[in-house]
Image (cartoon, coloured by chain):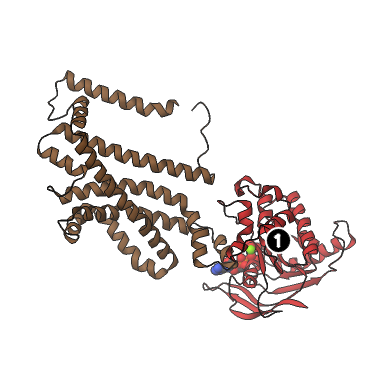
Chain colours: A brown, B red
Amino acid sequence: MLERLAPVAVTVALIALWEGLVRALAVDPFVLPAPSAIGAALVASAPSLLAALLHTLTITWIALALALPSGVGLAFLIHRSALAEAGILPIAVVLQATPVVAIAPIIIIWTGVDQPDRALVVIAWIVAFFPVLSTLLSALKAIDPALHDLFSLYGASGRARFVRLELPASLPALVSALKVASGLALIGAVVGEYAAGSGAAQGLAWRLIEAGNRLEIPTMFACLALLSALGLAQYALLGGLERWVLTRRGLAASRRPAGR
Amino acid sequence: MSLLRLEGVGRRFGDGVTALAGVDLDVPAGAFVTLLGASGSGKTTLLRLIAGLDQPSDGRIVWAGDAAPTLGYVFQAPTLLPWATVAENVALPLTLAGRRDPEAVTAALAAVGLEGRAEARPRELSGGMQMRVSIARALVARPTLLLLDEPFAALDEITRDRLGVLLQRLWREQGLTIVFVTHSIPEAAYHASRAVVLDRAPGRVAATFDFAADRPRERTSPGYFAACADLAAALARTMAGAHEDA
Ligand SMILES: Nc1ncnc2c1ncn2[C@@H]1O[C@H](COP(=O)(O)OP(=O)(O)OP(=O)(O)O)[C@@H](O)[C@H]1O
Ligand SMILES: [Mg+2]
């Protein structure tokens, strides 16, 4: 119980310290606004900030929804065929190794400058898809060859092998990959908005830039806080899903001994 | 009458390893054939060839019918799906054939004494119980030929003896033909109606012994120690001069 409260207590203490220091030292709000000022900005522009949050959330999860089947599909293809491995994997690696900020402007041009959301989805998808692909590939490679023999022995079709062996065997890895991918997809969406720039995008990152241009520093911090909260919430949600899957599999880490 | 015959079967692997060379082996229908041989003599390779998991590079495998009969295969490890229940694991050969037969699953579990554990997950079972699940899975589709690759090697001696007795009983009751790979001379002498000793790499048949199939299977039976001694001597001959690379 104490372990669960600890991060909350530390956060509250840090915020209190921040508030106290800003007031005591009379820090210029253009440099560092007090938490209370940020909270006030958050409340003041709540409707528009929440709309922006929802927008970024939507982009992120559409990208995730695309990254999952495409990553899984490609992983299976690459796993099944050496030709696909030789053809596809290097491209995926190059795509992964190139900084997404550098690709973003090109993608925005390709998807149409007047369609920034499409570009955002593509950018977020590019960064989210690789962990799904690579995690799943290693999970597939880790399946006991004897299990594959077993399926061959009893004349399993490719479909049966996929549904009854490969998919369930890689499920825990898939959920972990999704957890990592959700954070990356959010980063991708944010980077995309930065690249899309002036007025075209409607997400949180764009609100952040806009607030910066207008020197509404507390609003900037409010956007930042919302982005962190979003990332944290996604991570917690998918972390919960991961624990649930692992527990069902009996793979969850055993409970820590009492007294720790 | 033979259920299957290997004629000059050889298996070379791409990296220049010859696992088997010119194996002639006859498996009579209803026999309990034990395959004994040093590590690396090609026992697993031979079993995989019979199961069709691998193809011979020389020679051929001739089946009594036109094609291979229904097979059951027990791997060295239990090789269970960890996320599936015991019943689902046992049912796998049926499921993969698009069949559903809960009664066959129940019967197979009963045959190995696990009727109460149908809903358990493999991790909740001991090693010996997992091996019994694996045997039940091999039996569920009512195979005519059961292949076992050192199934009890990882188990303690008491469990091993119990499962040996169980296997003997299944063989007698179900009229199976069994090919049983083992490292253990006592195990081979206990089970075999035909005991085959493989030469060291490249594996070929070094010796074959036939025993009465319906002999009493007590460790105190007169023939038992003689059989052990014969097998030990044959195995020792294949090992002559092999100490340096054992
Ligand atoms: N897929 C393979 N590729 C290359 N070499 C192989 C392969 N399978 C087996 N071999 C080789 O063939 C030889 C026989 O192997 P096999 O596994 O059949 O022996 P074994 O008698 O079952 O040994 P053990 O008692 O240790 O299980 C070994 O030298 C092994 O390295
Ligand atoms: Mg072997």
Q: Amino acid at mark 1?
A: His
Crowd band around label 1 with a 10 angstrom C-alpha radius: few (<14), some (14–19), many (20+): some
Please report the residue visible at 69 percent of the width from the left and 51 percent of the height from the top: B155
Taking A227 as reference, is A159 above or below it? below
Q: Find residue B110 and report its horizontal and vertical position in percent.
A: 73, 54
Along the line of sight, the residue nearer the viewer: B231 or A161: A161
Q: Secondary structure at mark 1?
A: loop
- Report if the beta carbon of the residue with label 1 is closer than 8 angstroms to ligand 1: yes
Q: Is residue A249 left or right of residue B124?
A: left
Please report the residue visible at 25 percent of the width from the left and 37 percent of the height from the top: A226
Give the residue number, with chain letter if any, for mark 1. Answer: B183
Residue most toward the top? A24
Please report the residue visible at 52 percent of the width from the left and 35 percent of the height from the top: A255
The chain containing the residue under callout 1 comes to B
When asked about the image quadrant of residue B244, the answer is bottom right
Q: Find residue A210 and report its horizontal and vertical position in percent.
A: 13, 41
Q: Find residue B111 and report its horizontal and vertical position in percent.
A: 74, 56
When asked about the image quadrant of residue A93, the answer is bottom left
